[in-house]
Image (cartoon, helix red, strand yellow):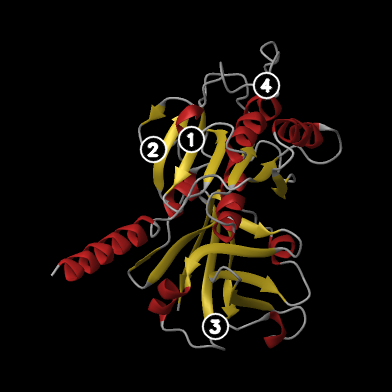
Amino acid sequence: MQKIASRQSFAALFIFLCCLGCGRDDRPNSTLVFQSDFGLKDGAVSAMKGVASGVSKDIRIYDVTHEIPAYNIWEAAYRLVQTAPYWPVGTVFVSVVDPGVGTKRKSVVLLTESGHYFVTPDNGTLTLVAEQMGIKEVREIDEVNNRRKNSNESYTFHGRDVYAFTGARLASRAISFEEVGPKLPAKVDTLPYQRAAFKDGKIFGSIPILDVQYGNVWTNIDKKLFENLHIQMGEAVTVKISKGDSSVFQGRVRYVNTFGDVPEGELAGYFNSLLQFSLGINMGSFSEKKGVGSGNDWNIILSK
């Protein structure tokens, strides 16, 4: 009986220990990823990376992009959600598109339900990652303890003095998430936009971003929603694009798998690498030819 009891106790202990290891470890993983609208023409990006390296030489530093158009918070929001899901749990992102630098807007760190960290001004940059990756917790950066030494008289480069410094301290585990600063309500400032929806035989969506290298137009309409139109491959879809109340493009576009399925110079409707409906021209720029831009004020309607 004692042997049976001992075996049962051991089995129970083994299961307990296994369960302890089942939880996801979403602590920072020494990976720091930068994004900004600074460009690479001067030393701003290098300065941020220098601050991060000064915190810990063991941090692995990467970039999303530093070519966000100046002051374009919406594009910063999109590039984060385009990129972050492909990075490991525990990755720390520092995003600095901050036209309100030095004002009373909050500096925060968001921990998403997916286990990723975002260090940024709370100015709308977190709109899409909060929506799609979930909000686990938000903390305001305590700039008394989490600010580069002797930088208090600098009001216009929080990317270097606050965000890079705090992000590096968090990524290297020099501080815990709790030591970032006080806990805030589980919400962030958001930018308004047209969420994709099907209504009365039409799909209403937005154009959040352009595939800037090639001029393709990306929407927020996914494949499941598109299927409500019952349009078969090779058939045409009616497309209406507007900016605010101004109509920019209206026409019929053939639905295909890829650009080469239409003759050179012809319009194509296809699903991009994120499986969102997009518009392109085989060997051409849809955006340039049709005068279409992107942002939270650009809308699209699809119908049969």
**Residue 147 place in picture, x, y as percent:** 62, 21
Quarter of the image that includes the N terminus: bottom left
Q: Which mark is residue 148?
A: 4
Q: Which residue does the image show at 36% across and 73% down from the upper left?
A: 201
Question: How far apart are the two marked residues, 3 and 1, measured between alpha carbons?
Answer: 51 Å
* Sooner in the amino-acid sequence: mark 4 or mark 3: 4
Q: Which residue is mark 3?
A: 236
Look at the numbered disc 3 and give the secondary structure of its residue: strand
Q: Nearer the viewer, residue 221 or 241?
A: 221
Q: Nearer the viewer, mark 4 or mark 3?
A: 4
Question: How far apart are the two marked residues, 2 and 4, measured between alpha carbons?
Answer: 27 Å
How would you rate the neighbour count of disc 3 (Cα within 10 Å): few for under 14, some for 14-19, many for 20 or more? some
Q: Nearer the viewer, mark 2 or mark 4?
A: 4
Q: Which residue is mark 2?
A: 187
Q: Which residue does the image show at 76% across and 61% down from the upper left?
A: 213
Look at the numbered disc 4 and give the secondary structure of its residue: loop
Question: How far apart are the two marked residues, 2 and 3, measured between alpha carbons?
Answer: 41 Å
Q: Which mark is residue 177?
A: 1
